[in-house]
Image (cartoon, rainbow, N blue to C red):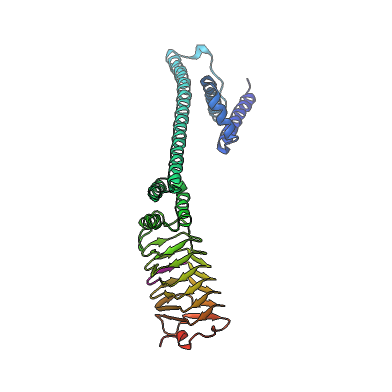
Amino acid sequence: MGSNTWQYAAVGALAVVWLLLLARRLKLPVRRRRKREAQSPVWVSIIGWLVVALLVAAAAGGGLLWILGWPTMPKQAAFTTTEMLDLLKIGLAVVAGFGGVVALAVNYRKQRVTEAAHTHALNQEERERTKLFNERFKVAAELLSGEQPGLRIAGVSAMAGLADDWEAQRQTCVDALIDQLRLHEDDAQTANKIFRALRDRLGTHREAGPWSELNFDFTGVRFVDADFSERTFTGAVVLDGAEFTGDHTSFERTAFRNTTLSCHGTTFTNTEVNFQDAYFDFGAIEFVGCTFDRTTLNLHRLDALYSRIDFYRSTFTGSSVVGHDLTLSLPVRVELCTFLDSTIDLRTFEAGFQAVRYVGGEPGGLPTASSELPQ
């Protein structure tokens, strides 16, 4: 065989090896290839690895001969005994190399089978775990919908415990608890049990709890002496259409971080709503279309860092909004609100900073002194 033929063969072998490596690098049809590997017998993998080994050997040998200038092989009589033994050793080494290729192919398939079995076991375990969680959810939901208060209280404990364990569906479990506040609004025992479950998992005003990042939709819920004090919320808090009564409604020292407290159409009747020392960080308080009837809204020392406080189309009857030593990044915005025998008095730490901004002019009937800046 001429030197040109050897060169063409070496170049062809190198091209085949390069294409194989490129296809593996680009992971061309990965899913189909993996599927074939999973279904093909072991001998197919062995042959495949042997072919790759032969191509690599041919490419390496051809490249070496090309570097050496394609020397001609001497005749058999020119070899000495020592050289023949060396050639025999080389042959045995090549055979051992092919045996290593076979062992490599077998170990590779064995590893793939082990990984597939492990993945299947994990998937099966996850399916069983999800099935168990679904069964627990069904039992807890049935208890919550029970006719007797004792059953509902047991359901609260079961649903709260499930929410602790089932992080993927924690929001669903908490939503189911809040639904009970609407369905059984006259059941004070169940409501108190639910509030204790919420408070225990909302951390403190300094540190968030495991449920703090959830969204709490209390739309249409009736609250009596609601106590959300010294908790942390990082998810949305929706109080739209809710009704607050009782001597005291407390958000004292409560932290709202990167979230909005939505009060749209909310009613506060004959109560004190206490936001004293509350903290809003990059969030908002929206009092839109609210009704304040004989209510005191206490904002003393409220800290609203880069947060807005809006009163829009709200009605105040015999009520007051008070807040001294406020820390505000933006003035409190009051627009299209009605004040009947009511006052608003908000003052900041910083003298001269506008604590209140009336959009469209100061509401009629509002005492002038209530909007004065601190001296």
Q: Position of residue 49 (x, y in %)?
A: 52, 24
* Quadrant that contains the N terminus: top right
Which residue sits at x=46%, y=41%?
134
- Residue lying furthest top: 77
Q: Nearer the viewer, residue 11 or 192?
A: 192
Q: Position of residue 324 (x, y in %)?
A: 39, 79
Q: Nearer the viewer, residue 111 or 333?
A: 333
The image shows residue 201, relative to residue 273, as above or below, that is above
Q: Position of residue 369 (x, y in %)?
A: 45, 88
Residue 241 shows in this picture: yes
The image shows residue 71, relative to residue 177, as above or below, that is above
**Left or right: 66 in relation to 200:** right
Residue 65 shows in this picture: no
Instruction: Answer with the quarter of the image where residue 312 lies.
Output: bottom right
Chief secondary structure of the magenta portion: loop
Q: Nearer the viewer, residue 323 or 45?
A: 323
Which residue sits at x=51%, y=11%?
77
Q: Position of residue 345 (x, y in %)?
A: 44, 81
| Residue 281 falls inside the magenta stretch | yes
| Residue 302 falls inside the magenta stretch | no
* Quadrant that contains the C terminus: bottom left
Instruction: Answer with the quarter of the image where residue 22 lies.
Output: top right
Q: Nearer the viewer, residue 189 or 375?
A: 189
Give, as a single range, the part of the protein colored magenta. 275-282
**Left or right: 169 in relation to 24:** left
- Number of numbered discs overlaid on the protein picture: 0
